[in-house]
Amino acid sequence: EPEVTQTPSHQVTQMGQEVILRCVPISNHLYFYWYRQILGQKVEFLVSFYNNEISEKSEIFDDQFSVERPDGSNFTLKIRSTKLEDSAMYFCASSFGTSGSQETQYFGPGTRLLVL
Amino acid sequence: AQSVAQPEDQVNVAEGNPLTVKCTYSVSGNPYLFWYVQYPNRGLQFLLKYITGDNLVKGSYGFEAEFNKSQTSFHLKKPSALVSDSALYFCAVRDPILTGGGNKLTFGTGTQLKVEL
């Protein structure tokens, strides 16, 4: 069964450093998402992406964040200058469509980011 | 705004007994509702969803959920719990009018299910 994959599984970085989290969505999916889960808290939406554009973003997704689909398979989340409060589990998700049976979002295993 | 509440942080059930994990939602229009399960050190796995149609939705691993519009609830149920069902369960909602093409899901805080022998 196809699945969303994410690399790395864990990343430790120093405050102020740039990090890039990578995701390979399910191959025929067209919509891509990033969510995050701070330890012990709920899963929060960051951004959705379709047709090489951001469709929607949350207040969390400020100028320090960016997303890109650099090729036909990868979907990346970049944090330009990490802060301590960026420490979280970051989940990538993808869906084929946005309505009916096509809109189920399938999640990857996550990247645990720790900012020191 | 769209929101979802899971009133129980933890639910304990004996194996073989029925289980219920509660979820209530708030949206301005008709909701799209989802249940996901998270096993330790794993991502979120899709269990089932309600978009439209029959209020009783059946999903993976014998789980089902009932959409109740009057009570704004979407409780997850299983007739006979297994120890292997022990995990963290998340309810999520999307207001298709509010979120438009963004498809943003709003999650509850999660309910830890513990099934004991």
Image (tube, rainbow, N blue to C red):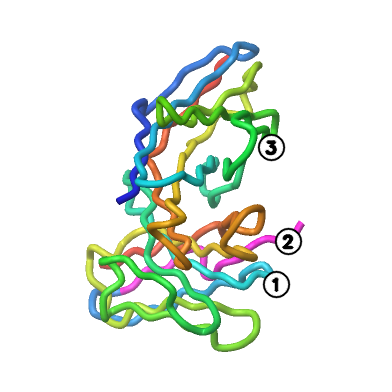
Q: Mark 2 points at which residue?
A: A2
What residue is shown at x 69% (from left), y 33% (from top)? B61
What residue is shown at x 61% (from left), y 65% (from top)? A97
Residues indicated by labels 2 and 3 sit on the same polypeptide chain? no
- Classify residue A80 by image quadrant: bottom left
Q: Name the residue under label 1.
A: A27
Range of the magenta residues? A1-13
- Label 2 – label 3 distance at C-alpha: 16 Å
- Label 3 sits on a secondary structure element that is helix
Q: Mark 3 points at which residue?
A: B60
Spot occupied by residue B64 in the image (x, y as percentages of width and height): 62, 29
- Classify residue A85 by image quadrant: bottom left
Residues indicated by labels 1 and 3 sit on the same polypeptide chain? no
Spot occupied by residue A95 in the image (x, y as percentages of width and height): 60, 63
What residue is shown at x 55% (from left), y 82% (from top)? A51
Q: In this view, does B95 lie above or below A73?
A: above
- Label 1 sits on a secondary structure element that is loop
For the question of whether residue A20 can be seen, the reply is: yes
For the question of whether residue A106 can be seen, the reply is: no
Chain designation of label 1 = A
- Label 2 sits on a secondary structure element that is loop
Amino acid at circle 2: Pro
Q: Nearer the viewer, residue A101 or A25?
A: A101
Q: Give yes or no for contact between labels 2 and 1 (Cβ–Cβ under 8 Å).
A: yes
